[in-house]
Image: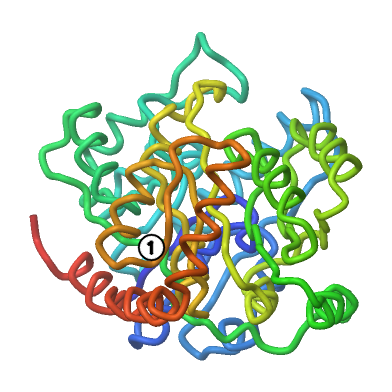
Amino acid sequence: MHIVIAHLEKVTLYPPVINLIENLLNNKHRVSLVSYDIMSLSARIIENKNFQYTDIPQTVGSGIIKRYRRGMIRTREGRAAVEKYMKNADVLWTTTDLTVRSLGDTVLKYKHIMQLMELERWYPQFKGSKLFKFPIDQYARRAWKVVVPEINRAYIQKTWWNLKEVPEVLPNKPYNMNPGDPLPEMEEALEKMKKEEKKIILYLGFIGSDRSLKEFAQAVEGCGKEYCLYVIGKVSDKSKDEFEKLLKKYSCVEYLGYYPAPKHLLFLQYAHIGLLPYNPSGNHLYISELNALYCAPNKIFEYSAYGIPMLGTDVPGLRQPFEKYNIGICKSKLDVDSIKDGILEIEKNYQIMSENCKLYYSSVNLDEIVNEILTKEE
């Protein structure tokens, strides 16, 4: 089967899209990718004989005019590339809401799979606009399949958008846990973790308003010399000032920077406990406050693959797998004592939890799930 993947954003910032590409190629499908920053993908993707791509030119800078120009290029180049590839393809698979908005009615010409990374009732027609809304729900109702990363999101999205069928669930599990050799700029950070004598509590992921690290830093600081907190990931523009304050205030916290997937996996070999702090809030313009409540982090699978028990906030998206597989602890109160108790609970059951993590990772078969999405008729 020939699949056109349209991801009109920077592909290296979206591990689930990389997972999808590798899955399809490994199962002998032809893949045509329309995206940004494609040449930063691994050689095993770029050099695959069944892979072709259109790397959309990137424009830099801020301001309304430059943003408008970026949007025009994205729309023009994206639509042209999709239409070119779809002349000989079977399915168009879009991966984000922005991609659907940019392609517009172009997606209606084809057998369209709409994948959603976030849980949302609506999507803006223009960035930052509350008044003008893009009718993304109408495109979802006309799509062949809708795909989300978590089962609760599937039923919520069906209800909100009046979909005929419950969306398919494709978990954010990494398809390939082989990160390859480290980038030169990673070596110093990796060596620092390797030589760390304390037990490393690791947060690996996006650093934003819905990922509360302050309370965890307080707790680790209060644990004395036994633990330290390492943070790796991209910091949102809105969170930079607050994050800088956190680093200055807590000496136990080490920030090692951001590294593209799958290279970030190299840091997991040195972690003792993995953090999954999710803070449901209604501060985002269009992403639902339920998004963090029914989180679907690829981090659960990344930590699990390395046998790293997890400590997270008490939200259904974490509590359900944690309790079912005994791979981590959720804490409803984010105070120093509760988090310390959580660390102690993990330590008491560390070996069992570590073994269960690997069982959990093996419990999801991505090949079967993607094959069913592509072959099962509604």
**Residue type, numbered disc 1:** Met
Q: Is residue 14 above or below residue 314?
A: below
Residue 66: % across, % down? 80, 32
Q: Is residue 317 left or right of residue 47?
A: left
Q: Which corner quadrant holds the N terminus?
A: bottom left
> 197 above or below 111?
below
Looking at the image, residue 375 lies above or below residue 288: below
Which residue does the image show at 72% across and 46% down from the upper left? Answer: 217
Total residue callouts? 1
Residue at image position (27%, 70%) is 370
Question: Foreground residue, 278 or 121?
Answer: 278
- Report if residue 136 is visible in the image: yes
**Image x and y of residue 150, in percent:** 31, 51
The quarter of the rendered structure image containing the C terminus is bottom left
Q: Position of residue 189 (x, y in %)?
A: 85, 73
Q: Which residue is mark 1?
A: 86
Residue farthest along the top direction in this orientation? 131
Left or right of 260 on screen, residue 253: right
Q: In terms of depth relative to the viewer, which is nearer, 39 or 227?
A: 227
Can you say whether 60 is above or below 123 in the image?
Answer: below
Taking 368 as reference, is 209 left or right? Answer: right
Instruction: Determine if residue 21 is in view.
Output: no
Residue at 22% in and 39% down: 142
Left or right of residue 159: residue 208: right
User: What colour scheme has been applied to the protein in the rendered image?
Assistant: rainbow
